[in-house]
Amino acid sequence: MHGYQHTALNLATTSVVAAALTLLGHPQTAAAVSTGMVFGTLLVTPDLDLHYNDARRNWGALKAIWAPYAAMSTHRGINHTYLAGPLLRLLYLAFWFAVPVYLLWQWPAAAAWAREFPREMLFSAFLGYLMSQWLHLLCDGIIPFQQRKRPRPARGPLSRTEQTRSSGSRWSRR
Ligand SMILES: [Zn+2]
């Protein structure tokens, strides 16, 4: 799937999720989940492991911060996993923004605002971010819990079923 197709599908899904949550009477959750989904669609996507991609361009003057990330990555390696990849990208961002956030924290008004910010909104935004990443992976044809598996070393003669399983395309790299 091309980058623009991922973006279009993710944004369309975001609209549906936001509309559904609003209609169910949870407008604040809708806003938080959509914020997370848009963040995970336009700014922090699994394809940041590529040197040229839409998300990286969207960072504008700050796009250089993703250069080391792409240089350290193999496309569709750990970045295209369901939990480690999304968490790794947030940690990577935290690394870059730790000092500015710390400095901002020294400003009493900002610290007070952050302390009073509803934790459930943060959690909803995080869920929205995860949903955007998972939708991307599904569209890439990556099924949860199946990627990165490797056949166990054989301890003895393989049974007929095991031979079929280990020689099949199930373990081939995507
Ligand atoms: Zn991808």
Image: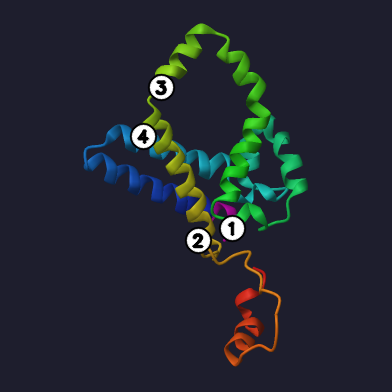
Q: Is residue 37 visible?
A: no
Labelled pair 2, 4 in contact (Cβ < 8 Å): no
Mark 4 neighbour density, 10 Å: few (under 14) some (14–19) many (20 or more): some
Residue 112 in sight from this viewpoint: yes
Magenta segment range? Answer: 1-5
Q: Secondary structure at mark 4?
A: helix
Report if the CB atoms under discs 2 and 1 are less than 8 Å apart: no
State whether label 1 is within 8 Å of ligand 1.
no
Residue type, label 1: His
> Magenta-highlighted stretch: main secondary structure?
helix
From the Cβ of disc 3, is ligand 1 less than 8 Å away? no
Q: Where the C terminus falls, by quadrant?
A: bottom right
Residue 11: give x, y in percent of width and height: 44, 47
Between label 3 and label 1, give the one nearer the viewer: 3
Q: For the point 48% across and 8% down, which residue is it?
A: 109
- Comparing 123 with 133, the one in front is 123
Q: Give me the residue at 51% from left, 38% from top.
A: 39
Q: Which residue is mark 1?
A: 2
Residue 35, picture quadrant:
top left
Label 3 or label 2, whichever lies nearer to me, is 3
Q: Secondary structure at mark 2?
A: helix
Which residue position is annotated with label 2?
A: 138
